[in-house]
Amino acid sequence: MKYRRRLYRYGDAAEVYIFPVSDNGRKGKGSRGKRRKPSRNCQRALNNRHRAGRLGREIAFNFGAGDCFLTLTYKNAVQSYERAHKDIVNFISRYKRALKRAGFTGEVKYIYVSEQGRNSGRWHHHIILSGELKTSEIQKLWGLGYVDIRSLEADDRGSFSGLANYMCKYGSDEDNKQRGAADIMTGGRIHRSRNIRPVEPAENDFEISRRKAGRIANEIEAGDQVCEYIPSLKGYNVYEKGSFFNEIDGCYYLRLILIKVKKHRKGKRV
């Protein structure tokens, strides 16, 4: 059957996905057993995983050192999404004008999500911003409550998957209860500035049997040498790899994370 290899490259990382597709380019259907429709919670979790993956790549591709992650809360709770949305849009406008006054000449980029506590009903915003301003000035620009400001920092593989998952925190009530969440949050739409560049993948298709796909999956799980269907990227090492057999469609899915090897300059001898 036909499989597709999808490669994303951004920052110091690369992601490789291998998955089945049908002749029309959509995800393929395995022949093992009858295809079953995924449950509502299962589909929601899968959609959110893809959503968070896209967001994490965009953060790594568009932001860097000096940029920040803000959480904006309200002193007096607002009761509607329309009011909350207007507040964050006005804040971004004030932020851009303040950066211009401070002499910032680069592009201002942002990604934000507005959320409401399901139990408390209180709105707040998470926003990633480019540019640098003093904490006190950002606090004045918001002016409606508390501001938590953190430097934007990637994890040890140059990824922002943790932050992306946090900003896309959907999930079932049961999942949140197991994590001990006091207030289950409902994630909203991810808003992006128009100058956010997406990470476009490189793709190619090839024919392999399901048995061979299973063998490749077992080799990856066993930590064996990466097979010929995985791109050998010069200057990258495999950081993480794994496979998954989907009982719904009877197919194997493979995923690898590769990290660029950083060159260390030799110091001068004294």
Image (cartoon, rainbow, N blue to C red):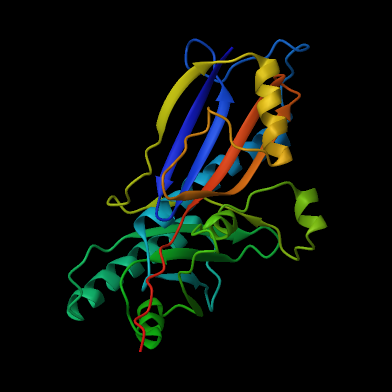
- Residue 245 location, x and y as percent? 72, 28
Tell me: residue 203, above or below residue 152. Answer: above
Q: Which residue corresponds to the image point at 22% horizontal and 73% vertical from the top-left?
A: 97
Residue 120 lies, with reference to residue 229, above or below; the image says below
The residue closer to the viewer here, 245 or 113, is 245
Q: Is residue 189 visible?
A: no
- x, y percentage for residue 23? 50, 10
- Towards the viewer: 30 or 129: 30
Which residue lies at the image location 41% right of the left edge and 80% below the top edge?
A: 143
The image shows a total of numbered marks equal to 0
Q: Measuring from the top left, give residue 196's x and y in whole percent.
A: 32, 51
| Residue 129 appears in the figure | yes
The answer to which quarter of the image holds residue 100 is bottom left
* Residue 225 left/right relative to 149: right
Q: Quadrant of the C terminus?
A: bottom left
What's the residue at 35%, 85% (across, down)? 134
The image shows residue 30 at horizontal and vertical percentages of 68, 14
Measuring 54% from the left and 34% from the top, which residue is drawn there? 17
Q: Is residue 125 above or below residue 250?
A: below
Q: Quadrant of residue 222?
A: top right
Pick the quarter of the image with the N terminus: top right
Nearest the eye: 219 or 87: 219
| Residue that sits furthest to the front in the current view | 269
Residue 169 vs residue 263: left or right?
right
